[in-house]
Image (cartoon, coloured by chain):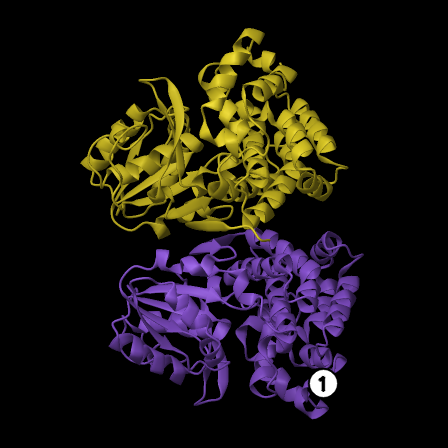
Chain colours: A yellow, B purple
Amino acid sequence: MEKEFTYCMPTQICFGAGAAKKIGDHIKGENVLIISDPFLYSNGTAKEIGDCMTGKKVTYFSEIEPNPSCESVNKAAAIAREIHADCVVGIGGGSSMDVAKAVSCLVDNEGSLYNYYSGGTHTFKPRKTMLICVPTTAGTGSEVTNVAVFTNKKIGIKMPMVNQYFWADYSVIDPELTYTLPPQMTASTGMDAFCHAIEAYWNKESVPICDMLSIGALKLIMENIKKAYDCPNDKKARGNMILASLTAGISFSQTRTTGIHALSFPLTTEFGANHGTACSITLPAFIRLVSHNLPGKMNDLAHYLGYEDGLALADAVEALMISMHMPVRLHEIGVKDSDLEHITQVGLGAAIIHLTPAEMNEETVYALLKSIL
Amino acid sequence: MEKEFTYCMPTQICFGAGAAKKIGDHIKGENVLIISDPFLYSNGTAKEIGDCMTGKKVTYFSEIEPNPSCESVNKAAAIAREIHADCVVGIGGGSSMDVAKAVSCLVDNEGSLYNYYSGGTHTFKPRKTMLICVPTTAGTGSEVTNVAVFTNKKIGIKMPMVNQYFWADYSVIDPELTYTLPPQMTASTGMDAFCHAIEAYWNKESVPICDMLSIGALKLIMENIKKAYDCPNDKKARGNMILASLTAGISFSQTRTTGIHALSFPLTTEFGANHGTACSITLPAFIRLVSHNLPGKMNDLAHYLGYEDGLALADAVEALMISMHMPVRLHEIGVKDSDLEHITQVGLGAAIIHLTPAEMNEETVYALLKSIL
């Protein structure tokens, strides 16, 4: 190791079946805003967690949509300010946690998210409002990153926002919250975590500490995702999947992602693919490409996971996706040949694409997409 | 994974050859106290790092002895208070960094270390004084723990102190600082890091995130320690060793250590063995014992490192130690048969011994020591 790197992940992690029931132990102050999506509110999950906050005044905001908009953030922030929130809790997949990150900052900072995000000129002052993240899927890793992704509806673009105050004070990781995840969501969110881990591992800005976590996460996913898909009640598999998502999250929190995530943005905003599907659909092709450019590191990984080389790993990942009825060709999500040029352009517009350890230009990206049309 | 755990390591890590030269970038405030041992002061290392702190008023305290006493801490704290230190920097092996941890707290807290440590009734208020750790060996991992070990000379006992304010704000990990470590110190400090990683891995309170870091650290040590011992200028091996020490440090910062460290305390205080030697001398015996009790996990580790099983790993570790002229029998450091009972008693007095995944009592510990007399 002669490489330079920095590493910092200050969030306190509390992991365990039943951990969500102890969430009240961590909360300072009285007024709590719980942010979730409508489904987690109507099925009682958000309420059940709120009920564990003995002695707190809990308000619920449950209007979070997938790929949340700046408007949703502003709406939630208005409520947080109104109730003088001491603590904002994001419960859900990436969306609710991402919104909670911005809202916890907006309580102590004037104006709307547009003042701070995507062309906004303001910067956040330190927040005093506490931020707690509670993931309910095993995929996004958002509970341990300082990144949030918002959709700017004004210009129709989904873009990440990185901020030092987006690190949660606590992340409460409770596998029990994932026991009822339906198989298709188990598959897509689990493969999102796979992408986080492998994109951190092969990243041009890879961090050796994260490499160790990534290979651990990838092994857990290869060994457990199908079990969790087949038997939603397999507690051990569920625990291992949310642990994998967590460690993959720590990894990519330091390195950011690469081409897979860059290309997922147009596949989600323009073709409606959910995030995990939009990512993993290009995953086998990227594994093949990177294995060519980074054979030593990719062989090490493949061997650790029990495969001959990177190409064999790519085949195994593709077979795994097919076994979980996930699309592995772009036409399956409605992409046509005539769309490839545009997807290429949008993907190349995301800075993270250049963290891929391969030349990423109009020609190479188009060829990669074409190979999996 | 159905186990409960918590994890938090908030220190910002800056790693790289030459990283120490950029230390000034991290320091807020004007008055800096650099704490080191006399050797690092006389050979110019402390001064060289201080000279990189452009625009700061730097004071040096270099009276740190191995296994530092509470008196040394109090002496350094008096100076830190006198100069109104904004930042305390510990440069060295564990001793200087451990002293810096306590001193950074004592600047903002009245009284002497005895008020807070080992029977003291006070608790530290949050410190405002910045704490930066700079390791110059690849072993202690003290740069990423909230633990410091002090010797209470009044009662002749070496004991760890754990405190939430002992996490450094920054740790600057610069492999260049280890290029001149003599072979014997490379061996003993490197094997200390090995013990940290494996004691975290087999710990009763093991943390899955740390297991991933531990196996990574153990692999790096097995592949690099002899290279660094044989060729002190092997930059790649030096970088890998200090990276291993860092990741092993993160691991045991969450789990604490086990029997190896518990027994090392009397071997150091009463037989004068340096810390790494006092730890690693019982390492092969502990690997054999734990492999018997925890065969699945120890086999996984052994396979990852390229060995048939835990017993083969123990043999390999012992051979590695012999190849670096480290003692592997207690009589080599002056222990006699008649000392074993006393060492057993003192070892059993350290709470961490019961984190070993094996029954630790007068009989079993005595038998373990006897087997390597």
Residue A308 sits above or below residue B353 on the image = above
Residue A249 sits above or below residue B4 on the image = above
Decide if residue A182 is in sight here: no
Residue at 33% from the left image edge and 25% from the top image edge:
A63
A234 lies left or right of A138: right
Residue at 30% from the left image edge and 80% from the top image edge:
B78
B253 lies left or right of A328: left
Q: Where is residue A272 in the image (x, y as percent from the top left)?
A: 48, 16
Mark 1 nearby-residue class (10 Å; few <14, some 14–19, many ≥20): few
Q: Position of residue A183 (x, y in %)?
A: 58, 26
Q: Quadrant of residue B139?
A: bottom right
Instruction: Check the picture and name the quadrant holding the C terminus of chain A.
Output: top right
Residue B258 sits above or below residue A208 on the image = below
Residue position marked by numbered label 1 in the rendering: B332
Label 1 resides on the chain identified as B
Residue A192 sits above or below residue B269 on the image = above
Number of dots carrying numbers:
1
A288 lies left or right of A74: right
The amino acid type found where label 1 is placed reads Glu
Q: Position of residue A116 (x, y in %)?
A: 28, 33
Q: Quadrant of residue A32?
A: top left
| Frontmost residue, A229 versus A198 | A198
| Frontmost residue, A175 versus A364 | A364
Residue at 46% from the left image edge and 55% from the top image edge:
B13
Decide if residue A304 is in sight here: yes
A262 lies left or right of A284: left
Q: Position of residue B191 (x, y in %)?
A: 64, 69
Instruction: Say what secondary structure mark 1 lies in.
Output: helix
| Frontmost residue, B309 versus A339 | A339
